[in-house]
Image: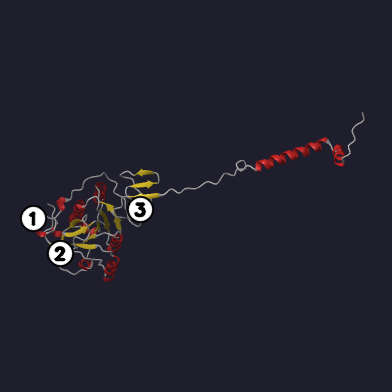
Amino acid sequence: MSPTRLTDPFAQRLVRWPAWLISILLHALLFASLAWSFRASPKAAGLEPERQVGIVLVRQVEGRREFQGQEETVSDTESVSPHPALSVSDALPNQQEREVDLSSVLPKVDGAAGDSGIRGLTDATQLGQGPPRGKLGDDAIRTEVFGAYGEGNRFAYVFDRSGSMNGFGGRPLAAAKAELLASLEDLQSHHQFQIIFYNESPRVFNPHGGTPRLVWGDEISKRRARRFVAGIEASGGTEHMAALMLALQLGPDVLFFLTDADEPVLSSAQLRKIRRRNNGAVIHSIEFGFGPSVQSDNFLARLANSNGGQHVYVDVAKLALE
């Protein structure tokens, strides 16, 4: 039988091509087909479906960090905020916790304490009318520092710790500490407070770190406050303004300001600035001096009188050791 004649021109040409060339063409067509199938699958091409991104909300509250769906409790000694305090020293003293008993350096009282109206004080001068009562709600508490009475829910204590407070055997600073701690004992857990000791710069009681703020008057905070106060030492010069302005930013109802400094005085312009920045706080000024008071209208008296408070003069010579 004779071979079949191919009449198709393309077939006639294909017969004349080498076998290896035909094999290459067939494989190329096969690879092209596979590549097209591969591109049609998003997962095979590495294209994952779009995923939604969630945001975890974090709310910082007193004593703990709360996260959406879970809560992380902070221990008694852990700082809540990782941020440093702003231009203040806030570290608690690195010492074993201990109770502070400074009652031995309080002034002696001749007769009942209520006779003078001043806790542990025999000779003092009080000016001003004191704070109005009954305007701060049923939860307000009444406390005092050297006979200057304050009523409220939020208290700030701004105390001088310059080198002169270490005179007379350290009795001025020790007596100031004792009065401060006695006042804190009047507060309950729903009240708030802040302690600022200052010389050339403020040192703030800031157990939680971060921006200084008022602290609740619970037993844990009071225990930390006792440790903080125990670690305060007298040194350096005196700069009143920074400490006072910092305390006013916290919005206290009552501010107790204690200093033994005749110099530097607060100028009239500075007193006006304090009055403008004061958003309703009663400011009591406690003045430590040697001997009877000879000036009843100094800058401390004007500070108290222009901010609804009392000016109390304390003769440090009367601060007895026994």
Q: Residue furthest right?
A: 2
Local secondary structure at mark 2: strand
**Numbered-mark total:** 3
Local secondary structure at mark 1: loop
Q: Could you tell me the amino acid type at mark 3?
A: Gly
Tell me, for residue 112, which label it has, or none.
1
Q: Which residue lies at the image location 34% right of the left edge and 50% below the top edge? A: 61
Q: Could you tell me the amino acid type at mark 2?
A: Gln
Local secondary structure at mark 3: loop
* Disc 3 packing (10 Å; few <14; some 14–19; many ≥20): some
Q: Residue furthest top?
A: 1
Using the image as rendered, state which of residue 15 and residue 318 is in the foreground.
Answer: 15
Task: Tell whether label 2 touches label 3 (CB within 8 Å).
Answer: no
Residue 13 as seen in the image, left or right of residue 197: right
Q: Could you tell me the amino acid type at mark 1?
A: Ala
The alpha-carbon separation of the residues under discs 3 and 1 comes to 44 Å
Q: Is residue 64 visible?
A: yes
Tell me, for residue 210, which label it has, or none.
3
Q: Position of residue 208 (x, y in %)?
A: 32, 50
Q: Is residue 81 visible?
A: no
Tell me, for residue 143, which label it has, or none.
none
The alpha-carbon separation of the residues under discs 3 and 2 comes to 38 Å
Residue 218 as seen in the image, left or right of residue 71: left
Using the image as rendered, state which of residue 215 and residue 175 is in the foreground.
Answer: 215
First in sequence, mark 3 or 2: give its number: 2
First in sequence, mark 3 or 1: give its number: 1
Residue identified by numbered label 2: 126
* Image quadrant assignment for residue 157: bottom left
